[in-house]
Amino acid sequence: MADIEELEQWEDGVYQLETTDPVEGGADGVDNKPHKHLANRTVYLKSKLEKSTFASMIIASPSNVVPDGFLECNGAALSRTVYADLFAKIGTTYGVGNGSSTFNIPDLRGEFIRGLDNGRGVDSGRGVGSFQGDAIRNIIGSFVMGDSSGRYNFSSANGVFSTAFSSTGVNNSGNTAFSVDAGVEFDVSNVVPTASENRPRNVAMMYCIKY
């Protein structure tokens, strides 16, 4: 008994056997028409599904369970032969492993992914897989120091600066010198939220890579 030949093609309809159809088997027999149509659809859909989740595709998993067919993006060194499809896609972009039989996958734990600039001019000079450290825009401020009646005063401050009480000079009689502590304080938290790192608002998920 032979199997039905399956083709990777989409069938617009599945043939319905009629009461007037003859009983006819074989590869092109009318009795096998609906089975061939369903078999072809199955092969077609299976192929499309496999191509939609290709090796090296990265997803963000909303749980700490790694989906089937994926690996956590934790920088692990993997066999170049066991994970041949994945190695063919990313090579040694994220690490050479032991230099001969293994390679590294991306380590995305605690990291943000940024779209490759690819000529746009926003984040120039970078390639796929390149790492970029943290940075912030420059933070500025100013203060004004004035002279009034023999006293030097920090009369105003803005931005990251704030004034501490300030007055230095001589008394009105001009006979006795005196000084009062004066200063300007610098505190970035006056204008932006602060923490031990620079970060945007975020939600933690686990990045996983298809192998």
Image (cartoon, rainbow, N blue to C red):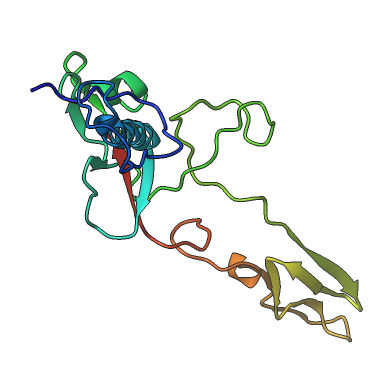
Q: Residue furthest left?
A: 1
Q: Is residue 186 above or below residue 87?
A: below
* Foreground residue among 96 and 23: 23
Tell me which corner region of the image, top left, top right, bottom left or bottom right, holds residue 154: bottom right
- What residue sits 35% from the left and 42% below the top? 16
Q: Position of residue 197 (x, y in %)?
A: 46, 57
Tell me which corner region of the image, top left, top right, bottom left or bottom right, holds residue 17: top left
Q: Is residue 85 above or below residue 161?
A: above
* Foreground residue among 186 and 59: 59
Q: Position of residue 72 (x, y in %)?
A: 25, 44
Q: On the rendered structure, is 164 left or right of 66?
A: right
- What residue sits 22% from the left and 27% below the top? 24
Residue 91 visible: no
- What residue sits 50% from the left and 46% below the top? 134
Residue 111 visible: yes
Q: Quadrant of the C terminus?
A: top left
